[in-house]
Image (cartoon, grey):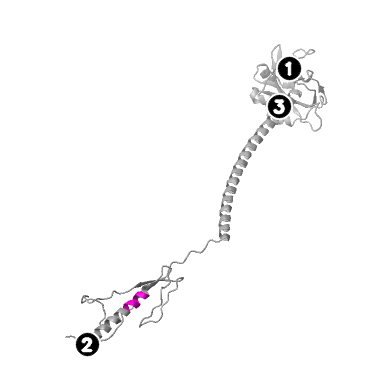
């Protein structure tokens, strides 16, 4: 039989357990925004309050044991005296910080940066296009300059050809003498279109085994020019004699019978050579001089003689 004291003690224990359960449920009630529903008190802590702006509270409470609990249950042993239920386990998690608001100055700065980037890209593309156009124009200018230079060169050549066509040209021919038998005259004739003024003449007579063994032209350059025909003006088509040679002069030129016999046998050739220096009468100022070189072979025979143009090209040139 259960005594009255034991029954009262069991009743008090049940009342204490019910009061602890009510307190735990009150602490576990938290609003969705993080604010607690009510303030509760416990034996181990005073008042507990969780601000909604800084943290969120997660409360887990232990299960309330009943009379049919297992032997391994964590239910406290309150048989020896009154006790309260175990306090609820509280875990506080700090929420992620809220993103900073995007203000209008930041938006304007971001838009300005994007606009500057676009403008910079467009400027670079325009600069590249301008450089390409400049390169093409430079190439066109180079081609045009080359074409202009070619045209100028062609015009210069054309002008020079006209000047050469209109300038005097003195040519050398051999004419038989009308007054001396077996005598010949070296004649200078103006075959150009302009009048010519003879500046000087130079001539020499020599003997050689053939036409290729003529003396060096430097000997002719060092010879003293003749002033006999200086200042003679030849109009187009006019002629003048610059050197005469006849059969009677052969013996005096040879100087010995032995050399005279070699000339008769054509073992040695009598060669006359020289040059005529003249200028264009139509040009004024420092006018360039022109030269005509000539060479003739006097052919001495036993009864008759002759004279023909001869010599290498260097002795028959025109400038």
Relative to 224, residue 268 above or below: above
Q: Which of marks 3 and 2 is in front?
A: 2
Indicate the quadrant containing the N terminus: top left, top right, bottom left or bottom right.
Answer: bottom left
In the rendered image of this protein, does residue 56 appear above or below residue 187? below
- Disc 1 is placed on an element classified as strand
Q: In this view, does 213 lie above or below 123?
A: above
Q: Select label 3 or label 1 by which is in front.
A: 3
Q: Quadrant of residue 54?
A: bottom left
Q: Which residue position is annotated with label 2?
A: 4
Indicate the secondary structure of the residue bearing disc 2: helix
Q: Give the range drawn in magenta.
A: 20-26
Q: Find out whether residue 80 is within the magenta segment.
A: no
Residue receiving disc 1: 174
Q: Which residue is drawn at 33% across and 77% down?
A: 22
To which residue does mark 3 refer? Answer: 158
User: CA–CA distance between discs 3 and 2?
Assistant: 153 Å
Q: Say which residue appears at 65% left-offset and 37% top-offset.
A: 141
């Amino acid at each position: 039989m259960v005594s009255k004291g034991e029954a009262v003690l069991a009743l008090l224990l049940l009342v204490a357990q019910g009061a602890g359960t009510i307190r735990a449920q009150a602490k576990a009630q938290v609003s969705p925004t993080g604010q607690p529903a009510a303030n509760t008190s416990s034996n181990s802590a005073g008042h507990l309050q969780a601000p909604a702006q800084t943290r969120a509270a997660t409360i887990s409470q232990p299960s309330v044991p009943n009379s049919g609990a297992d032997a391994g249950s964590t239910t406290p042993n309150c048989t020896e005296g009154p006790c309260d239920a175990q306090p609820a386990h509280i875990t506080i998690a700090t929420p992620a910080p809220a993103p900073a608001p995007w203000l209008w100055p930041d938006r304007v700065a971001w838009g300005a940066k994007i606009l500057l980037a676009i403008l910079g890209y467009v400027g670079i593309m325009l600069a590249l296009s301008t450089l390409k156009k400049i390169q093409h124009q430079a190439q066109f200018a180079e081609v045009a300059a080359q074409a202009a230079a070619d045209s100028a060169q062609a015009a210069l050549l054309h002008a020079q050809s006209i000047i050469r066509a209109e300038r005097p040209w003195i040519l050398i021919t051999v004419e038989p003498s009308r007054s001396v038998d077996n005598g010949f005259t070296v004649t200078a004739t103006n075959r150009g279109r302009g009048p010519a003024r003879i500046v000087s003449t130079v001539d020499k007579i020599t003997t050689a085994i053939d036409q290729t063994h003529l003396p060096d032209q430097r000997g002719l350059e060092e010879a003293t020019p003749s002033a006999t025909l200086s200042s003679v003006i030849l109009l187009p088509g006019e002629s003048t004699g610059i050197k005469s040679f006849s059969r009677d002069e052969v013996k005096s030129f040879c100087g010995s019978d032995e050399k005279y016999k070699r000339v008769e046998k054509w073992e040695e050739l009598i060669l006359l050579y020289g040059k005529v220096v003249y200028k264009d009468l139509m040009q004024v100022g420092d006018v360039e001089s022109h030269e005509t070189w000539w060479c003739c072979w006097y052919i001495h025979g036993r009864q008759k003689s002759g004279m023909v143009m001869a010599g290498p090209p260097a002795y028959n040139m025109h400038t």
